[in-house]
Image (cartoon, rainbow, N blue to C red):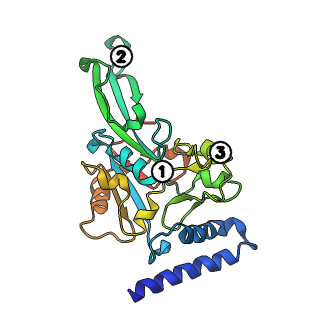
């Protein structure tokens, strides 16, 4: 315990030292100063050292059944508005129809739907079963970009990257300009209707800094979502097994954002 507290103090000293250099190099130290404020204001794990972790979430599309439990858990855990407009995570269903033989194509029309973000699950598709080539579910959330467009466009540094791989929003500094919402290429941000600030998935930062899993991962009945720390992978860690046995890729890799959310079984039709 003593060693852990020492690590915590050392981490805060690092942050304090970096924050002290803001006047000299604000562009390179703004995130560390923002994290220092966030750690103290939001009551994250007392002994948590953000420099000693590197978080990653992987999603196995073949395991997702579209039950909506992750969406419901996320809204309850993070006080996301219960309306059908705002989500930190949601689920989409992709239904690919068989192609008309006359067209010479292998696949037909792709239909994407996400009723209420998948909160209540999915009713049967309106497409007749005999016309369906394949159908699958894809959970969506903040992609936790290594090169995050949202933090790059924030004019006041309210959105910032953390050393452990999260992308957070300091609500006290956010002025609600909406630049980050427009900049996100994955559609993962929204303006909170009550706070009038930007909001998004934080990986349940208040949970993971205490050794817990994100709410969406905790409740997934099929373990379609796997979450772990790349700096502390045990030999039997589910994340290690996933990485070693699955071919994982990110959404829109051509954008160069280098997401920390990866997918296995990702179909080319997924946006």
251 vs 152, nearest the viewer: 152
Q: Quarter-wise, where is residue 168 in the image?
A: bottom right
Q: Residue at x 31, y 24 (%)?
A: 125
The CA span between labels 3 and 1 is 18 Å
2 vs 261, nearest the viewer: 2
Task: Provide the residue designation for mark 3.
Answer: 178
Give residue 163's position: percent from left, percent from top.
52, 68
Q: Quarter-wise, where is residue 17 in the image?
A: bottom right
Q: Quarter-wise, where is residue 170 in the image?
A: bottom right
Question: What secondary structure is found at the residue carrying circle 3?
Answer: loop
Indicate whether 69 appears above or below 129. Answer: below
Farthest residue, direction front: 194
The CA span between labels 3 and 2 is 45 Å
Q: Say whether residue 114 is visible.
A: no
Sequence-earlier tag: 3 or 1: 1
135 vs 8, nearest the viewer: 8
Farthest residue, direction top: 102
Q: Which residue is drawn at 44% across and 48% down?
A: 250
Q: Sort mark 1 into few (<14), some (14-19) or many (20+) by Cα contacts within 10 Å.
A: many
Tell me whether the residue at label 2 lies in contact with that at label 1, contact meaning CB atoms closer than 8 angstroms.
no
Q: Which residue is drawn at 37% across and 40% down?
A: 138
Q: Which residue is drawn at 41% across and 89% down?
A: 2
Q: Say whether residue 32 is visible.
A: yes
Give residue 148's position: percent from left, percent from top.
57, 54
Q: Of circles 2 and 1, which is in front?
A: 1
Question: What secondary structure is found at the residue carrying circle 2?
Answer: loop
Task: Provide the residue designation for mark 1.
Answer: 143
Give residue 139's position: percent from left, percent from top.
38, 43
The CA span between labels 2 and 1 is 36 Å
Task: Provide the residue designation for mark 2.
Answer: 104
Quadrant in which the N terminus appears: bottom left
């Amino acid at each position: 315990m003593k060693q852990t507290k020492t690590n915590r103090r050392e981490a805060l000293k690092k942050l304090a030292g970096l924050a002290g250099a803001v006047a000299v190099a604000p562009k390179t130290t703004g995130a560390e100063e923002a994290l220092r404020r966030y750690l103290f204001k939001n009551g994250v794990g007392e002994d948590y050292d953000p420099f000693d972790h590197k978080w990653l979430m992987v999603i196995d599309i073949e395991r997702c059944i579209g039950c909506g439990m992750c969406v419901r858990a996320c809204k309850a855990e993070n006080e996301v508005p219960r309306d059908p407009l705002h989500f930190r995570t949601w689920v989409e269903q992709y239904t690919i129809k068989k192609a008309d033989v006359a067209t010479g194509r292998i696949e037909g029309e792709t239909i994407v739907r996400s009723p209420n973000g998948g909160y209540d699950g999915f009713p049967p598709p309106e497409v007749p079963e005999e016309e369906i080539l394949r159908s699958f579910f894809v959970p969506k959330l903040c992609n936790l970009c290594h090169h995050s467009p949202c933090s790059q466009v924030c004019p006041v540094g309210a959105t910032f990257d953390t050393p452990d791989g999260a992308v957070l929003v300091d609500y006290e500094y956010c002025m609600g300009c909406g630049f980050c919402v427009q900049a996100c290429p994955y559609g993962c941000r929204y303006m909170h209707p009550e706070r009038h600030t930007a909001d998004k998935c934080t990986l349940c930062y208040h949970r993971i800094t205490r050794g817990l899993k994100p709410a969406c991962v905790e409740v997934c009945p099929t373990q379609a979502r796997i979450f772990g720390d790349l700096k502390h992978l045990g030999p039997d860690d589910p994340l290690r097994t996933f990485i070693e046995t699955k071919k994982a890729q990110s959404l829109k890799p051509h954008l160069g954002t280098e997401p920390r959310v990866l997918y296995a079984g990702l179909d080319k039709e997924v946006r």
